[in-house]
Amino acid sequence: MVTVQTLKREIVEVGRRVYARGYVAANDGNISARLDDRRVVITPTGVSKGFMSEEDMIVVDMDGKVVSGTKKPSSELFMHLNIYKHRADVRSVCHAHPPYATGFAVAGIPLEKCILPEVIIVLGGIPLVEYGTTGTEEFYAGVLRRIATNDAFLLANHGALTVGKDTFNAYYKMETLEHFAHITFVAQTLGQINTLNKEQVQKLTEIRERLGIQTGGECVTCEEEGTCQVPAPAPGPQMPDREALIRDVTKAIMDKLGSPR
Ligand SMILES: [Zn+2]
């Protein structure tokens, strides 16, 4: 069984990476990990995630009561606890504001197109959930509505959220989400996004099933968005042989001029 000390160490390391990669500014973001059926380790409020120590971590019970730790738990504590209550397989929750993913969340654009194989296998389509005031139930109501089928979310006008089977699994999904948002932004800027078709997506779904990945929202195929590329036209009639053409034209000219005297 994982120890409380291991979880504290992992959360400190994930906090350092989230901050170093610019996924949060100042004291933004929160990370938690489930210790057992009754206890969760969570980051404190008002502390930069890039400079936390294991002593800063707080252990709470499933009702949000502090079991150990001297600091105040994250203001999003109840979002974390409710996600654990809805999904027994989730062992960690990561919330941050990575700029590209958050840009899509602010623009009101979900990342639901079937574009990159890795993303389709690991996350599927990434929905955009409704805006809600931070620190209240409405903030995470949209997440709870879709938590049964999704591991990654864009939070409208706010940021992103991922869940996973352990601390690093949830964090890596945040990396994948932000990388995907960045690539989508670049492709869009270049002027075109080629979405995969149903047959291509089906093959990736089979890989996902073989890997035992249970969740992952449906992504939108090019058939569904009506943007599949038209197949290249069939090759036209063959051009006549070049030498034969020159020979024929020369003969026609010579015939017209008549035989030399
Ligand atoms: Zn936030």
Image (cartoon, helix red, strand yellow):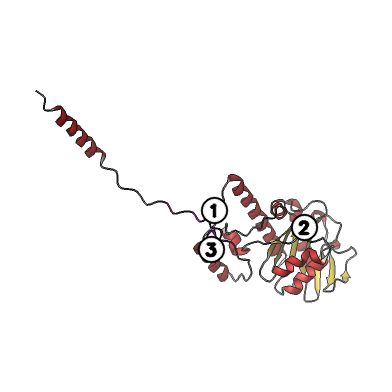
User: Residue at point 29% right, 43% down?
Assistant: 239
Write down the quadrant of residue 141 in the picture. bottom right
The amino acid pointed to by label 2 is Gly
Q: Earlier in the sequence, mark 2 or mark 1?
A: 2
Q: Which residue position holds label 1?
A: 194
Q: Residue at x 75, y 70 (%)?
A: 83
Quote the CA–CA distance across marks 1 and 3. 13 Å
Residue that label 2 marks? 15
For label 3, the residue is 201
Decide if residue 120 is in sight here.
yes
Q: Position of residue 60 (x, y in %)?
A: 84, 70
Location of residue 238 with respect to 68 vertically, above or below: above
> Horizontally, is 71 left or right of 234 in the view?
right
In magenta stretch: residue 228: yes
Mark 1: give few (<14), some (14-19) or many (20+) Cα within 10 Å.
some
Counting residues from the N terminus, which is met first, the one under dot 1 or under dot 3?
Answer: 1
Q: Pick the quarter of the image with the C terminus.
A: top left
* Mark 1 C-beta closer than 8 Å to ligand 1: no
User: How far apart are the two marked residues, 2 and 3, measured between alpha carbons?
Assistant: 34 Å
Distance from Cα at disc 2 to Cα at disc 1: 35 Å
Chain part drawn in magenta: 219-232
Work out whether mark 2 precedes mark 3 in sequence or the reverse, and give the earlier one. 2
Residue 244, how many percent across, how many down?
22, 39
**Closer to the camera in the image, 130 or 117:** 130
Considering the whole magenta stretch, tell me its main secondary structure. loop
Q: Secondary structure at mark 1?
A: loop
Amino acid type shown at disc 1: Asn
Please tell me how crowded label 3 is: few (under 14), some (14-19), or many (20+) other residues with Cα within 10 Å.
many
